[in-house]
C-alpha cells in the first residue's frame, strides 16, 4: 500500500477534533469551532487520500495551533557553572 502523502496527519486531525468516528469503519469531518459534523460518511482511506481536506487542514490556524502546542518543547532553564560561580 505504500506511504500516504499526508501520513500522520489523519491521527493529528482525529486528536484535534477535525475528524470523528461516527460508526464502525466510518468517519466524518468536523468543524471544531462550531462542532458542526458533516453529513457525509467516509472511509478512513477516502479521507487519507483527500488532498483538499488536508490542504485546508494545514491552512487552518486552529489546527496549526494544536500541532504547535502538541510538539513545541518549552525552553528549559539551564544553569551554567559561571552562574554558580557568580553566586559565591
Image: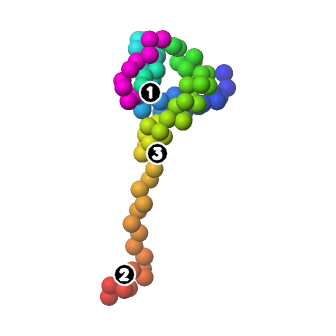
- Upstream in the sequence, badge 3 or badge 1? 1
The CA span between labels 2 and 3 is 34 Å
Seen at 55% across and 25% down, the residue is 53
Q: Residue 6, percent across and down?
A: 60, 30
Above-or-below relation of 86 to 50: below
Query: SS of the residue at dot 1?
Result: loop
Q: Is residue 36 magenta?
A: yes
Q: Residue 39, percent across and down?
A: 44, 11
Seen at 40% across and 18% down, the residue is 37
Q: Is residue 54 magenta?
A: no
The CA span between labels 1 and 2 is 48 Å
Type of secondary structure dominating the magenta stretch = loop
Seen at 45% across and 50% down, the residue is 72
Range shown magenta: 32-40
Mark nearer the viewer, 2 or 3: 3
- Upstream in the sequence, badge 2 or badge 3? 3
Q: Are marks 2 and 3 in contact (CB under 8 Å)?
A: no
Label placed on residue 84: 2
Query: SS of the residue at dot 2?
Result: helix
Q: Residue 76, percent across and down?
A: 41, 62
- Upstream in the sequence, badge 1 or badge 2? 1
Q: Which residue is mark 3?
A: 68
Q: Residue 30, percent across and down?
A: 43, 22
Residue extending furthest toward the bottom: 88
Q: Which residue is mark 1?
A: 18
Image quadrant where one finds the N terminus: top right
Q: In the shown orientation, is residue 49 left or right of residue 82?
A: right
For the residue carrying disc 3, how many other residues have a C-alpha within 10 Å: few (<14), some (14-19), or many (20+)? few
Seen at 55% across and 20% down, the residue is 47
Q: In the depicted view, which residue is nearer to us: 84 or 20?
A: 20
Q: Quadrant of residue 65?
A: top left
Residue extending furthest toward the left: 88
Amino acid at each position: 500500500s505504500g506511504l500516504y502523502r499526508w501520513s500522520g496527519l489523519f491521527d493529528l486531525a482525529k486528536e484535534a477534533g477535525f475528524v470523528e468516528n461516527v460508526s464502525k469503519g466510518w468517519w466524518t469531518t468536523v468543524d471544531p469551532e462550531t462542532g458542526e459534523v458533516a453529513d457525509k460518511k467516509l472511509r478512513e482511506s477516502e479521507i487519507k487520500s483527500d488532498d483538499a481536506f488536508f490542504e485546508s487542514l494545514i491552512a487552518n490556524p486552529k489546527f496549526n495551533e494544536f500541532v504547535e502546542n502538541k510538539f513545541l518543547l518549552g525552553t528549559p532553564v539551564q544553569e551554567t557553572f559561571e552562574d554558580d560561580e557568580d553566586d559565591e
